[in-house]
Image (cartoon, helix red, strand yellow):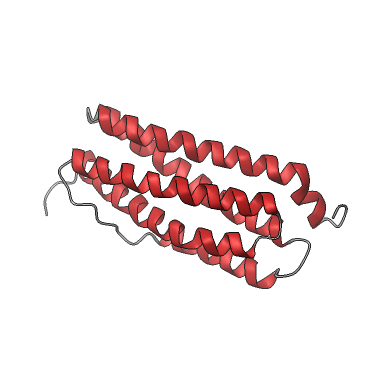
Amino acid sequence: MAEKTLDNLFHDTLRDIYYAERKILKSLPKMARAAQSPELKAAFEKHKDQTEGQIERLQQVFEIIGKAPRGKTCDAIDGILAEGDEIAEEYKDTAALDAGLLAAAQAVEHYEITRYGTLKRWALVLGLDDAAALLDETLQEESQTDEDLTTIADAKINAEAMGLAR
């Protein structure tokens, strides 16, 4: 068996996040439809648009490393998204629905932040500065989305879930 290197690991992880982003893109409209809060719906719709751009940047990174953009099944994101679907079903029409959807979305963001942070560092180590810049752009967007979701949660969603506001 051939020796595995950081190049291989970078490519495998890139395939993993490419799969994840494509799955997330499909799930965001469903999350927006399930959300009760107009602010949360808008956040999901905004992130759908961002995700389309993130997928394009990933395709550029694949091009930089001379590989075809292909995903690799990511059990982690499949599980996180399945939990989000479960929350949407179990808490449908309840005060806690939006808090659950928001938490599920933040779990996705945290997964993406770890992946993009790692990929950026590896790209720098591998001398792939253009790839690192593209990955950093997405990392910054994911971090901002996480902060925006926290702001929405703190402003209203968590209080509504407790039955304190409507």
**Quadrant location of the C terminus?**
bottom right
Find residue 44 and report its horizontal and vertical position in percent: 57, 52
Comparing 84 with 166, the one in front is 166
Find residue 115 and report its horizontal and vertical position in percent: 41, 43
Left or right of residue 109: residue 91: right
Residue extending furthest toward the left: 2
Residue extending furthest toward the bottom: 89
Is any atom of residue 73 visible in this view? yes
Up/down of 104 relative to 90, above or below: above
Please give the name of the residue rendered at 79% of the width and 56% of the height, measured from the top-left corner.
161
Comparing 5 with 67, the one in front is 67
Residue 152: quarter of image: top right
Please give the name of the residue rendered at 59% of the width and 56% of the height, measured from the top-left corner.
104
Left or right of residue 106: residue 76: left
Up/down of 21 relative to 97, above or below: above
Find residue 47 and report its horizontal and vertical position in percent: 51, 48
Count numbered badges in the picture.
0
Find residue 77 and report its horizontal and vertical position in percent: 45, 58
Please give the name of the residue rendered at 26% of the width and 27% of the height, measured from the top-left corner.
129
Residue 62: quarter of image: top left
Please give the name of the residue rendered at 55% of the width and 41% of the height, measured from the top-left corner.
145
Left or right of residue 146: residue 160: right
